[in-house]
Structure formats: C-alpha cells, structure tokens
Image: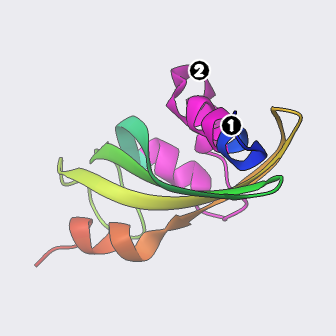
Amino acid sequence: MKTTEQKNAEAVTAFIEDGKNRCLLERTDQFFAAQITEAFTDRQFAVDDILAQGEKVIARIFMTAVHEGHFAGNAPTGKVVKATQFREFRVMEGNIVEHRGWFDTATLLPQIQAN
C-alpha cells in the first residue's frame, strides 16, 4: 500500500506533467512572471526532484524554453534555455488545494546574457 506522501507526490507529478496545467505553472507572485511567458516560447515543464511530507509537497521543476523576446534587459537570443522553478503544493485527500511557485532567475540569466 502506498503512503500518503507517495500518493501526494504522484498527484503533484501528474499535475505538472499534464500540459493543460502549463498556464498555472507559469504563474508566480514574482513581478516578472508575465515577462517570462512573453520572452520564452515553447515552454515545457518537467519534474526534476520532489519531496513530500504529510500534505506538503515541494517540487523542483525544469522549464525548457526558447528565448525569443526581451527579458531583464536582454535581447532575444534564440537559445534554448533551462530554468529552475520551485513550487510548493498542499495536497488534501489526493487533491491539490494550494500551490505557489518561484522561478530561479540565477539559473536563467547567465544563459541569455551576452558574453
């Protein structure tokens, strides 16, 4: 029998991998979140690591995208980039009832800056 943590981790992984939830994964409380959706096209999200404890699940997600618009003062490069996103989920009875996320721009900016 699976533990609650295993079930919750599976629910979150399924949520992240379901393409129809992509717009939810792009939303964060960070002021530049809208700029990410405008500057980076062909965004794909994949779970890199996941930790569950009780109803809380933390996921490290890689976003792979193409840099096709201005972002943080950087002109489009056409490069494929890989950015890290962290998301915290609260899962109750198999349902995600709350989640929030943060993009790690420290992994993103060096990939698009001019040398």
Q: Is residue 35 magenta?
A: yes
Q: Which residue is mark 2?
A: 20
Look at the image and tell me whether residue 60 can be seen.
no
Q: Quadrant of residue 42?
A: top left
Look at the image and tell me whether residue 35 can be seen.
yes
State which tag comes first along the sequence, 1 or 2: 1
Residue lying farthest front?
1
Q: CA distance from mark 1 to mark 2?
A: 27 Å
Q: Residue at the location (60% across, 42% down)?
A: 25
Residue 49 in picture, x, y percent from top left: 47, 56
- Judging from the image, the colouring scheme is rainbow
Q: Within 10 angstroms of label 1, few (less than 14), some, or many (20 or more) residues? A: few
Q: Which one is in front, 3 or 49?
A: 3
Q: Residue at the location (23% across, 67% down)?
A: 111
Asked if 27 appears above or below 13 in the picture, the reply is: below
Which numbered circle lies on residue 96?
Answer: none
Q: What secondary structure is marked by label 1?
A: loop
Q: Which residue is mark 1?
A: 2
Asked if 39 appears above or below 44 in the picture, the reply is: below
Residue 3 in picture, x, y percent from top left: 73, 44
Q: 90 left or right of 71? A: right
Q: Amino acid at mark 2?
A: Lys
Q: Number of numbered discs present?
A: 2
Q: Quadrant of residue 64?
A: top left
Q: 90 left or right of 10? A: right
Q: Is residue 79 magenta?
A: no
Q: What secondary structure is marked by label 2?
A: helix
Q: 24 left or right of 37? A: right
Residue lying farthest top?
20
What secondary structure prevails in the magenta region?
helix
Which residues are the magenta region?
A: 9-38
